[in-house]
Image (cartoon, coloured by chain):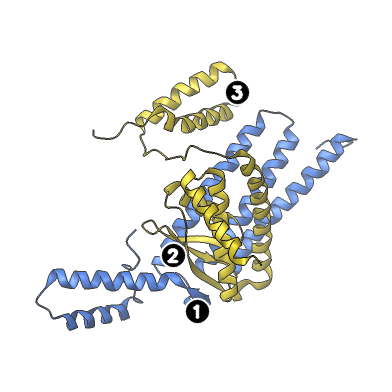
Amino acid sequence: MTPNATGADAVIDAVTAVLLIVGALMSLGAAIGLLRFPDLMSRMHAATKPQVLGLFLVLAAIGLQMREWWVWPILVVAWIFQLLTVPVSAHMVGRAGYRTKHLHPELLSTDELEAVVLRAAVKRDAEKAEGSDSAIPRTANGGNAGANRGSVGGPDGSRGPSA
Amino acid sequence: MSRKRTSFRTELPLLVWLVLVWGALWRDFSPGNLAFGALIAVVVARIFYLPPVELSGRFNVWRAIPFAAVFLGKVVAASFQVMYLAVFRGPSVSNAVVAVPLRSHSDLMVTATGHVISLIPGSLVVEVDRSTSTLYIHGLNVRNDVDTAKLRKEVQDAEASLIRIMGTNAELEALQAEGRTATRGVGP
């Protein structure tokens, strides 16, 4: 920033200041979200969204202050890589979190994945039982699957549709 | 090795992107540097072989630009929404995991939709079922069935925009046919 800026310089400095402050606020918002949200997946929301915008605003501020054309391509590339990697990492963490049950089911108003997971687990157990001992009568299979369904809540870590 | 050789045309977008990144990293877009970058791009694409990304072959720029603007607006809205929820709702926020079946079965389209949806308000992809092309989405601040329906519609709208930008012709026709029946159904 130039101390005694006039005209266009003053405008650019002012815009830069706003961008930097809002960008910093976004990162602050992400930090508050990480602290205050109750479970892993809501925290992933906080970790992904405000941070992407915050980075964008800070990069835009850098671009405005550098006044060199060659800095823009690298800033754009930096942001595009951010856009490409953030959803993937959020997805991987969210998926691992769901599979290892790092979530509070009481905070979910609906969970449409759970039914699918249970169905897949029951089917897999039935297949396993059939494969290991075909002499077991059908009813025993059903009872077996039912018992396993009860234990899906346990920390066996084996639930989840086969990806 | 029994891998199918990728045609140059399929690889071209990847090579162009690699050359642009090379130029940006060196902050030098002079022809000599770009030519050297192109050489490295070809070598990298040959040695570090990945399954090719199947592009549809069409890309509608006139739909892509407004989409990019709307997308940026939604990223801003999402950020403020998450910030608001973090500060004022915090621990009492109510979420949902919603299954959203997509129209398209192409990997590119499912991936693109998943990316877009992860960045716009209150949604995160938890699980992908590739066989049925269903996304399981974790929605932030989804309290009831109305919110669930809204989230589902939002995801499908995002997919529709992406199909209009870069879907295959078949997908586009299916989408338009669907739109016609929908408007006929709602119409007077």
Answer left or right for B176 relative to A111: right
Where is mark 3, residue-wise? B28
Q: Which shade of the palette goes to chain A?
A: blue
| Count of marks, rendered view | 3
Residue B78 is marked as none
- What is the secondary structure assignment of the residue under circle 2? helix
- What is the secondary structure assignment of the residue under circle 1? helix
Residue A106 is marked as 1
Q: Residue furthest top?
A: B32
Q: Viewer-proximal residue, A22 or B8?
A: B8
**Image quadrant in which the C terminus of chain A is located:** bottom left
Residue drawn at the location 61% of the way across and 26% of the way down: B27
Q: Amino acid at mark 2?
A: Gly
Counting from the top left corner in percent of width and height, residue B155 is at 55, 59
Chain for disc number 1: A
Q: Amino acid at mark 1?
A: Glu
**Can residue B168 be seen in this snapshot?**
no
Where is mark 2, residue-wise? A97
- What is the secondary structure assignment of the residue under circle 3? loop
Counting from the top left corner in percent of width and height, residue A36 is at 60, 69
The chain coloured yellow in the image:
B
Q: CA distance from mark 2 to mark 1?
A: 16 Å
Q: Answer yes or no: are tags 2 and 1 on the same subunit.
A: yes
Mark closer to the chain start, 2 or 1: 2
Q: Residue furthest left?
A: A135
Chain for disc number 2: A
Residue drawn at the location 51% of the way across and 29% of the way down: B16
Chain for disc number 3: B
Answer left or right for A65 relative to B178: right
